Image (cartoon, coloured by chain):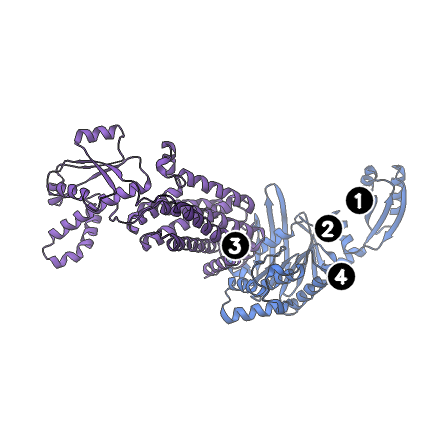
Chain colours: A blue, B purple
Amino acid sequence: MSCIELRNLVKRYGGRLAVDNLSLAIEAGEIFGLLGPNGAGKSTTIKITTGLLKPDSGEVEIASLNQRTHNVAIKRMLGLVPQEIAVYSNFTARENAEFFGSLYGLRGGQLREQAAAALQFVGLGDRQNEAAGKFSGGMKRRLNIACAIVHRPKIIIMDEPTVGIDPQSRAHILESIRELAREGATIVYTTHYMEEAEALCTRIGIIDHGKLIVVGTKPELQKMVASLEKLVLEVGGVNFTAVEEIKQLPYVKNVSLSGTRIEVFLTDTQDYLQDILSILARNGVRIRMVNVEAPDLESLFLSLTGRNLRD
Amino acid sequence: MAILVLAAKYIKTSLKSFLFLLAMVGFPLLMTFFMGMAIQDLPEPAGPPPVSLLYCNLDTGETGRQLDDYLSGAAASGWLTVIPADETEYRTALAGNAFQVAVRIPSDFTTRFAAGQSATIDIVRGQVSDAASAAIEAVVGEFTRRLKLTRAVDTVPDPSAAAVVPGILDQAASERGDYLTVRQPAVGGTFTSRSFFAVTTMVMFLLVAGSTGAIRLIEERETKTLLRVYAAPVTKSQVLLGNLLGQMTVTCCQAFLIILATGRLFGIVWGDWGGIIAATAAVSFVSTAMAFLVACLFNSARVAGGAVPVFVSAMTFVSGGMTGIENLSPVFRTLSDFTLNKWANGAYFSLMLGGRSSDIGTNLAVLAGAGLGITLLAMILANRREAFYE
């Protein structure tokens, strides 16, 4: 049975469709990565999952409890690490952890003990009496996580928890997340860093324009990547008519433009190079460089959406 | 329990914020201090100037005589300038609006009163300041209270049973309706120009505290701590009530600091503590409700922080809090009834003049009603937001 089940979620903001009929099942103990560029619908999906937003339609079930009827009970099981550093800067690290712990019903000695343990876990044990406002960005991020795990939730939802921090703090946070998973927590991790998702997650879902485009384990996604080819062309000047013609070729999955660089994603085929070069020549495009590269997961995203993860 | 946790967090973050403390405590105390020092050299009257009382007593019986004696006696001394009038003069003055306060005692007042029937003294209020109005109501109220007690004791054969008289009166009033007009049952406090400014300044700061509360809520939205709180297993109403309770507590503390400081530094006597607590709770409630409303209306803490003080300052001016209501034009005097300051100031003025909590019931009801109305409006606006935490 799935630990988290999202069924046909739809959410609109005015006329904009933020989540488009999204369905997803996450098993207990997984580190599930939700991957997508900014504005893809990751945070909206997270807010719906955590009960912060009501979907226009669709259902959310957590540990077999329906969110419409058991919202508070579900919230008790969840720990949310928001995208922003949501801590009180004039509180010490300990005061922050204790306050958020107390919202989950922890009191007295148990609260103090679990708050101290959470801070120790993220490596802030020796800084717990310092004001959060004086912490570095990385330390604040770690405190952000500590506040979410102080009540020892079964499910931890992390919305881009490593944005804007140094590599050392990032490594520490990623290791902490692995440790939480080893201790039995189910983790939903949103990011637009493909390398993070690859390094951390047992399964990855790629989301764009509110739609879940593909879900799979890393080997499954790599298999999809293996069936792709990535042709990189450096041209003298971009001709949009040529690009449109290339897009119409039956074996072309997607075309991405970046300055004078054209990236063409193709399914395995033999004769593509001749066709593409002919189109460019016919449209008077001067070719400076042609290269065939081995595609990575980021290429898979690009081939599926036509957008870069960091767009 | 979550409400208390959230209220405690609110108070704790307030106490830890230097800017918040400066805005909530430092500035009000400084302002009150400078105001007190500036007004120290001004002549201080013993109270508000005597009020002209147009007095038409048609009752030649015992009660009528008692009222004549009372108004010329010590209780009313210094508060009133009594202008005797017959029925025709009384009607003419009323028609021409040429009076401050008019009192008429009908000819059958003693007869009806002695028979235990309904008897009414008419009190008509003209254009007078809140303080003067409170004074006249206090004087007449005290007289009617004495009459009621006399009448009640007369009707109780056993003198030892007089102790139960107040209870009997209350019961009779609730069953048959009050048979006398009683609005202010006590008089005798002190009221000075410094008292006036201490009250109006404090009320202004208590209402401005609403902007500080709003800024806090908006900042919590901006820093996403409110989102995190909403993600916890607490309901929306618990979050709102917790924050409201915290803000109300902080505002009450602010008021008591000012009251204690002005009492200590300038000898201002604020009056009955029960009344002070009730008035302060009511003003804090309405101020907190304003904070909630402002937090629903504005997304920027900076805009909210600028808009509310301007609005409160305007209300303070219109209510006569800067000039005294008697110095305002008739239009502004009418408008003043629609300001929160007027009802808050009036409550504290009454208490300073010796009134008790039961005497400021109307003021408390208006403030509480306004607070509830504002809260309701804010809740409607909050519910219309897709997510209040954002």
Numbered disc 2: secondary structure: loop
**Position of residue B20 measured from the top left corner of the image (x, y, whole percent):** 51, 53
The residues bearing labels 1 and 2 have C-alpha atoms spaced at a distance of 14 Å
Amino acid type, residue under disc 3 in the picture: Arg
The residue to which callout 2 is attached is: A310
Q: Earlier in the sequence, mark 4 or mark 1?
A: 4
Label 4 or label 1, whichever lies nearer to me, is 1
Task: Categorize mark 4 by other alpha carbons within 10 Å: few (<14), some (14-19), many (20+).
Answer: few
Residue situated in front as seen by the camera: B240 or B190: B190
Amino acid type, residue under disc 1 in the picture: Leu
**Position of residue B387 measured from the top left corner of the image (x, y, whole percent):** 54, 49
Q: Earlier in the sequence, mark 3 or mark 4?
A: 3
Residue situated in front as seen by the camera: B286 or A184: B286
The residue to which callout 3 is attached is: A68
* Tag 1 and tag 2 share a subunit: yes
Amino acid type, residue under disc 2 in the picture: Arg
**Position of residue A207 measured from the top left corner of the image (x, y, whole percent):** 68, 52
The residues bearing labels 3 and 4 have C-alpha atoms spaced at a distance of 36 Å
Q: Verify CB contact (< 8 Å) between mark 3 and mark 4.
A: no
Q: Earlier in the sequence, mark 1 or mark 2?
A: 1
* Tag 3 and tag 2 share a subunit: yes
Task: Categorize mark 1 by other alpha carbons within 10 Å: few (<14), some (14-19), many (20+).
Answer: some
Residue situated in front as seen by the camera: B50 or A57: B50
The residue to which callout 4 is attached is: A219
The residues bearing labels 3 and 2 have C-alpha atoms spaced at a distance of 34 Å
Q: Is residue B175 depicted above or below B84 in this figure?
A: below
**Position of residue B193 measured from the top left corner of the image (x, y, whole percent):** 36, 44
The residue to which callout 1 is attached is: A257
Which residue is rendered at x = 78% and y = 52% of the image?
A299
Label 3 or label 2, whichever lies nearer to me, is 2
Label 4 or label 2, whichever lies nearer to me, is 2
